[in-house]
Image: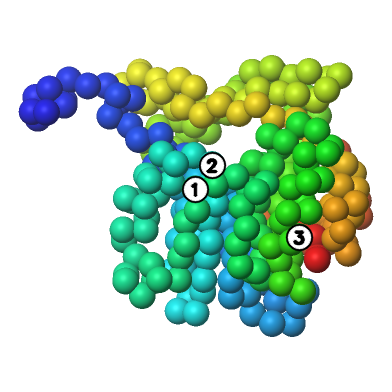
Amino acid sequence: MTRKKRNQLSQADQADRHLLYEASVQDTESELEFVSETFEELTGRPLKRIREDFCGTANTACAWIREGKNHEAIGVDLDGDVLEWGRRHHVARLSDSQRKRLELIHGDVLTTDTLPVDAVLAMNFSYYLFASRETLRGYFGRAREALVEDGVLFLDAFGGYDAHRELEERTEYDDFTYVWDQASFDPIHHHMTCLIHFEFPDGSELKNAFEYHWRLWTLPEIRELLLEAGFSSATVYWEGTDEETGEGDGIYSPSETGDADAGWICYVVARR
């Protein structure tokens, strides 16, 4: 493509949805800091080997490899095209020695067997795609089997009364606007369709860049299913509040009560 023709394309036409997703949705530094610190608090030893389920582009797995010379990671995802994108953009930037400590598997988290790991991570609410108690309990059981004796499963979860609404939320970044679109919600089954769009300064849009069909699981359900799957404990880590701003302070602590917020995100930590 010539420079002239490329310049005629809109910003949406030139955009890479995976780069936009990583810039707006993922924060691997904060996530891995929470996971590693919490794991060491619970087990008394450093975290070494993780498995990133629903890993997508394997951004988190690669970030973990880069953080320590003895870190190891496995990434599992059902979408081969997205895994290939991750190999080109993330794995390719690792050194030879780093790549030897990473394994990416094109497979189903419900059936894929891996060597035991210290921690399994299922983030970005990806396990919400399991719409029945039986299937979600089955996934939790498989995750438990993937852990060493003192291993830990890390999940994130979201909710709040706005989670039951059909709405759009916009977050502005330097070069684009991230749009979270709760397109539909069924209160009987808690099934929801969520979309991600991106808008650009030239007025162009990348519509339906990502589409999710989820069940909005509640925290009591998640904790009950983890215990039914055999985990010894399932603890909610709730975010604290900044007294000056009234917003979340980014510090998550074990909690048995939460705030009735319009929208919240928390971690659920299950010990094998």
Does residue 68 appear to the left or right of 166 in the view shown? left
When the figure is inspected, residue 144 is found, relative to residue 217, above or below; the finding is below
Work out whether residue 215 can be spotted.
yes
Which label number is shown at residue 78?
2
- Residue at 78%, 42% (x, y): give it: 136
Residue tagged 3: 144
Q: Could you say where residue 194 lies in the image, as x and y percent from the top left?
A: 62, 25
Front residue of 209/92: it is 92
Q: Residue at x 48, y 76 (%)?
A: 68
Q: Is residue 109 above or below residue 37?
A: above
Tell me the residue that label 1 is attached to: 106
Give the image quarter of residue 195: top right
Q: Quadrant of residue 201?
A: top left
How far apart are the alpha carbons under marks 2 and 3?
19 Å
Look at the image and tell me whether residue 245 can be seen: no
Contact (CB < 8 A) between labels 1 and 2?
Answer: yes
Task: Check disc 2: other Cα within 10 Å, few if <14, some if 14-19, many if 20+.
Answer: some
Q: Is label 1 in a helix, a strand or a loop?
A: strand
| Amino acid type, label 3 | Arg
Under mark 1, the amino acid is: His
**Three-letter amino acid code at the position of disc 2:** Leu
Q: Earlier in the sequence, mark 2 or mark 3?
A: 2
Task: Pick whichever of labels 1 and 2 is earlier in the sequence.
Answer: 2
Near-viewer residue (204 or 244): 204
Q: Provide residue 66's location: percent of width, then percent of height.
A: 43, 69
Q: Is residue 225 left or right of residue 20?
A: right
Whole-percent x, y for residue 76 in the image:
55, 52
Residue 98, compared with residue 45, is above or below; it is: above
Q: Earlier in the sequence, mark 1 or mark 3?
A: 1
Q: CA distance from mark 1 to mark 3?
A: 20 Å
Which image quarter holds the N terminus? top left
